[in-house]
Amino acid sequence: MDTIAAIATPSGTGALSLIRVSGDRTRQVILAACSGLKELPPDRRVTLVNICGGADDEVLDSGLLTFFPAPHSFTGEDVAELSCHGGRLVTQRVLERLFACGARPAEPGEFSRRAFENGKMDLTRAEAIMDIISAKSDLALRAAQHQLAGGIENPVQEAIDVLLSTCALLEAHIDFPDEDIPAQGIDSMLADVHSVRNSLEQLLSTATLGRLLREGIRVAIIGAPNAGKSSLLNRLLGYERAIVSEVPGTTRDTVEETVLFGGFSLRLIDTAGIRESDDSVERVGIQRAIETLSNADLILEVRDASSPHLFLPEGAAPANGTPRLILLNKSDLPMHPSHAADQGICISCLTGAGLEELRRAIAEAFPDSVSDVQSFAVAINARHRFALQQALDALDRVEDSFSQGAAAELVAIDLREALDALGSITGRVDTEDILTRVFSTFCIGK
């Protein structure tokens, strides 16, 4: 493979910038770019070098060079890392010099892809690296680190190993019916398949948790005009983000901001006051507010407890079972009699009263998710979810086929489909694995 180079630190101005080089010609590229360097420094030892270029071989920058020889590097190839001065111009000049010496620009994610292709990591660990980089909360970071340590790869690989053995046995019965192969009862194979299915179901159950960690908990703040929705958003954020006014209809569009809460990332969405309106622009905002409810993980309905109770339109009550908390705002004022029977949390966005109780209520709305992450549970992503569901569907057919006494050929087809689905998660299963298991286990043709 050709040699690639790229800036590994974010774009902008800083004290340092890191440039990575990977490939078979890494040594030649670095020696050509670093004037006066006759040979590379000892492996993994930081060395001061000058990166030179241009007609006069001028010094473009001074930096620290570290060399990682193959296969003991991130990509499994020869890798060099140059720690240069930060800044767009100087970093770009050093990078262009590396290109002139024989490297080419790396494609997005190409370093991690080479690590995968060279057997340094599976797909789940590669995804975990991206999750660590993009984590927006402590719990999301913890789940990503658990995944990087094999939290998803290990149970999936264990399931693959069991299914490979079962599939190898079936394939052997199909292809070598006259060989002296140790018999294994249908009940035993069925038990293995059922055990794998239970394990995969447990993994699949963490899909919602994974989405909450990666995307944040979508919290829709709804209510009638002037109930205090924007004031609540500002209170929870700790600064004035939304305009607060006594004029009804001030908020005409959704306003979204993110805040860390209990280890999770809360995506707070302030919406337009829901009411009947003749204003065409306000009606669009109200429609967006109602649409926001269908995608929310939690609904905070704010009511002005000091004024007569205003019932929201029927469309503001989604039927998808989304948790909803009733907030009786303006508790610093006398409560209107129409709210006497309301079951909700009394708060005051003016004084901050009741916000601690609200925070506890939000945490209690997701008790299983919080406890799962605290115990380092796996949190799969959408790609894993799709593959696991495919595998479970195939294993359902396998169990049915076993129970109905179907031909081994039909059972093997579904087992292969389950293996393909699981292999798409780690990227490491193909027909060769089944053949290897057949011949190593049964000593065919002895």
Image (cartoon, helix red, strand yellow):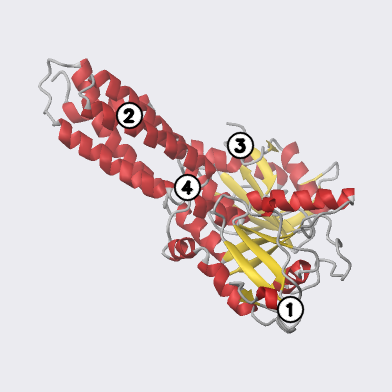
- Specify the label residue 103 is tagged with: none
User: The C terminus lies in which quarter of the figure?
Assistant: top left
Please tell me whether mark 2 or mark 4 is closer to you in this view: 2
Please tell me whether mark 2 or mark 1 is closer to you in this view: 1
Residue that mark 4 sits on = 72
Q: Identify the element where label 3 is drawn.
A: loop
From the top left corner, tell me how far across and down residue 32 is, in percent: 70, 42
- What is the spatial separation of the Cα atoms under label 3 and label 1, in whole angstroms? 69 Å
Q: Within 10 Å of the Cα at label 3, are there few (<14), some (14-19), or many (20+) other Cα atoms?
A: some
Residue that mark 1 sits on = 330
Q: Which amino acid does label 3 sit on?
A: Arg
Residue that mark 3 sits on = 25
Q: What residue type is labelled 2?
A: Arg
- What is the spatial separation of the Cα atoms under label 3 and label 2, in whole angstroms? 51 Å
Residue that mark 2 sits on = 397
Q: What residue type is labelled 4?
A: His
Please tell me whether mark 3 or mark 4 is closer to you in this view: 4
Q: Within 10 Å of the Cα at label 4, are there few (<14), some (14-19), or many (20+) other Cα atoms?
A: few
Whether 228 is drawn above or below 120: the answer is: below
From the top left corner, tell me how far across and down residue 308 is, in percent: 75, 72
